[in-house]
Amino acid sequence: MFPTDRPRRLRRTPALRQLVAETTLAPDDLVAPLFVVEGLDEPRPIASLAGQLQHTVESLVREVGVLRELGVGGVILFGVPATKDEVGSGAYDPDGIVQVALRAVRDEVGDDLVVMADLCLDEYTSHGHCGIVREDGTVDNDSTLALYARTAVEQARAGAAVVAPSGMMDGQVGAIRRALDDGGFADTVILAYAAKYASGLYGPFRDAVDVEIADGGDRRGYQQDWRNRREALREARADVAEGADIVMVKPAMTYLDVLSDLRRELDVPLSAYHVSGEYAMVKAAAANGWVDGPAVALEQLTAVRRAGADFVLTYFAHEVARVLQR
Ligand code: PBG
């Protein structure tokens, strides 16, 4: 018996493979997360995120300029304030570090690439939680919403084209949309971290933003339980109903089923966050010579697109954009 179906025919040459490829990955499918630290004199390497830096405003602006030349689709900024407090006031201070950085970046690149701001309080709170902490240690949803709303308006005023709420409070998208509209920022886009899991993969990020959750705590009281798949659809539908323009799944590689579900069920643009731990694992294995780092990065990011994401937030943006340009 001879096989009649011969899929290998289409794999014979690179040109054939390219012609029939179902999924593409281009620099403009990538968004680079960048960290900017208040009061820093020199950019500082982040040990657990090889190749990534805590930026000064100046080095941040330079890096965004390079990413623009590489054709990267966007950047998302995370601020690390010089001082933190119980209510995360640095997040909504008009002269807070992210607001200062947004103004500087927009001055440099305008709308050439999409300038986003992560919208949360955890980088700014002394206890490291994403909102207001009650006496009993739990995070209070509704009083936190008012602070997210203020933060959104300050970020938009400073030049964020997109605000990306990542705190997983119920009703956060609606509260932010109303505040933006009332503040005269009806054109500011909301990218909602809709299905954000209480993942073990955020470790290096917390080094990057100098966050330690108080009393050995965690975020399981507000981020999603990673045993749940259906719940992601419920979260994402709620966000779309409240006005999310784009929704996100986070992390990426362990949630491709969720991405695929959301792609099928929703008609808004969909993104995924290939998070710090995912990046660090590839980098660490590559540094040991155990895997080919750029090849694995390309495979993972393309898989995220294949599962349904229109674009990917990734620390590989710079490196992979260079590879793709060749
Ligand atoms: C919250 C936020 C986190 C990340 C992005 N936004 C941390 C958290 O929820 O603990 C993690 C991103 C990463 O790991 O790359 N502001």
Image (cartoon, rainbow, N blue to C red):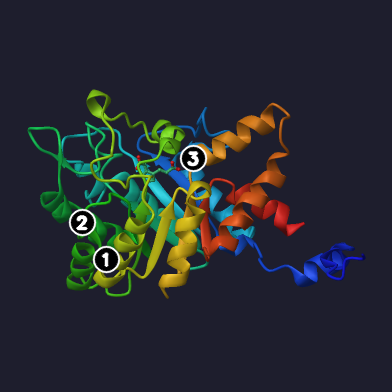
Quick one: quadrant of the N terminus? bottom right
Q: Secondary structure at mark 2?
A: loop
Visible residue check, residue 160? no
| Crowding near the residue tagged with mark 1, few <14, some 14–19, many ≥20 C-alpha atoms within 10 Å | some
Q: Amino acid at mark 2?
A: Asp
Residue that mark 3 sits on: 276
Q: Nearer the viewer, residue 66 or 25?
A: 25
Q: Secondary structure at mark 1?
A: helix
The x and y percentages for residue 76 are 44, 53
Residue sitting at 22 percent across and 63 percent down? 176
Q: Which mark is residue 65?
A: none
* Closer mark to the observer between disc 3 and disc 1: 1
Q: Is residue 175 left or right of residue 252?
A: left
Q: Is residue 57 above or below residue 47?
A: below
The answer to the question of whether label 3 and label 1 lie on touching residues, with beta carbons closer than 8 A, is: no
The answer to the question of whether label 3 and label 2 lie on touching residues, with beta carbons closer than 8 A, is: no
Q: Is residue 279 above or below residue 182?
A: above
Q: Amino acid at mark 1?
A: Ala
Q: Quadrant of ligand 1?
A: top left
The x and y percentages for residue 140 are 13, 45
The answer to the question of whether label 1 and label 2 lie on touching residues, with beta carbons closer than 8 A, is: yes
User: Considering only order in the chain, which callout, 2 or 3, is on the residue closer to the N terminus?
Assistant: 2
Q: Is residue 74 left or right of residue 156?
A: right
Q: CA distance from mark 3 to mark 2?
A: 25 Å
Can you tell me whether the CB of the residue at mark 3 lies under 8 Å from the nearest atom of ligand 1?
yes
Q: Is residue 268 left or right of residue 92?
A: right
- Most extreme residue toward the front is 1
Q: Which mark is residue 238?
A: 1
Residue sitting at 50 percent across and 34 percent down? 43
Residue that mark 2 sits on: 170
